[in-house]
Image: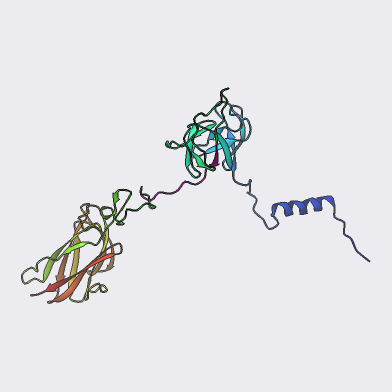
Amino acid sequence: MKKTWKLKGAAVMAMLLCAMTGMTGWSAQNYVHDNGSVAYLNTGAAISSGELVDLGNRYGVAVADIASNATGTVRTDGIWKFKRATTNAITAGTDVYYSDADTVTESSTADTYVGQCATSVDVVTELTNSAGDVVEFIEVDLNAPQREVVVGLDVLAPDGDGTSLTGVALDTEVWGAADVTIGDIAGGQLITTNTIAMQDIGGSAKSDYALIRVWISESEYGAASTNNIEALTLSTGTAVATETANADYWYVTSSAGAAVATITATAAGTNYLNVSVGANITSEAIVLTE
């Protein structure tokens, strides 16, 4: 005998609600609604449906008329059609900006980004017909993310030799290896005063603060060691951290990109003064003699 189950109205409604919203496993009580729209309190003049609304850090589109001092719904995403401000051709993906409440332009102005052209439009001679009606429109992907630009350089357009981007020379903008000059040994004292100067990757002096690591080792590019070393003292800049006392320090150069490393040894021998600037390391031998 086939059994059937009868559910009361409230139970049926609950099951349907769960099925439609997918909320069967939710316990959160602070969900409001899907993103893409905001409730906007219009403190200015009346806004007509379809008009752009300045939300402070982005634009939205009123989905219905919003009277002055009333609250209405404003969409912040989607593809929308607006009047064109110019007769120029605009290709898909081009950023477009606010011109007036129902018109956009490809001419950039600060803090007026609306979105990106969704469908290319051709050059036209007129934006209106003989009756004065607007006949040229553009579809806009509202608030589409803009392409990021790194430190003002177009990373998609390097020059042929790879040393510059869109006319900006990288060899003067990027830190290179430090220039380390080993000083003379103070007579009978086993003390040497050495200069450290910052350079760009082109090998020219670079004047700016730089975070460097300075250490003494027993071999070229070797690990920090105090063997044969009484003291390593850095000056002209600012101390940051000590890895190994008298052997290994983090340091910030002066604003001129310079530092001085004074080394006092305990006996004659050869040690190495190492300086790292980012991934660039310089290692210079110090031959200490009495």
Location of residue 44 (image quadrant): top right
Q: How far across and down, in percent of the image, does residue 234 sit?
A: 20, 62
Figure quadrant of the C terminus = bottom left
Figure quadrant of the N terminus = bottom right
- The residue furthest top is 131
Is residue 238 shown to the viewer in this render? Answer: no
Q: Is residue 109 above or below residue 202?
A: above
- The residue furthest left is 187
Is residue 124 shown to the viewer in this render? Answer: yes
Left or right: residue 5 versus residue 218 is: right
Q: How far across and down, in percent of the image, does residue 35 sit?
A: 59, 46
Q: How far across and down, in percent of the image, does residue 104 sit?
A: 50, 34
Q: Residue at x 43, y 36 (%)?
A: 107
Q: Is residue 165 above or below residue 103?
A: below
Q: Residue at x 50, y 42 (%)?
A: 116
Left or right: residue 220 versus residue 131 is: left
| Magenta-drawn stretch, dominant element (helix, strand or loop) | loop
Left or right: residue 288 versus residue 41 is: left
Q: How is the image coloured?
A: rainbow
Q: Is residue 190 magenta?
A: no
Q: Is residue 143 magenta?
A: yes
Q: How many marks?
A: 0
Left or right: residue 81 versus residue 57 is: right
Range of the magenta residues?
A: 138-153
Q: Is residue 115 above or below residue 66?
A: below
Is 186 or 56 nearer to us in this picture?
56
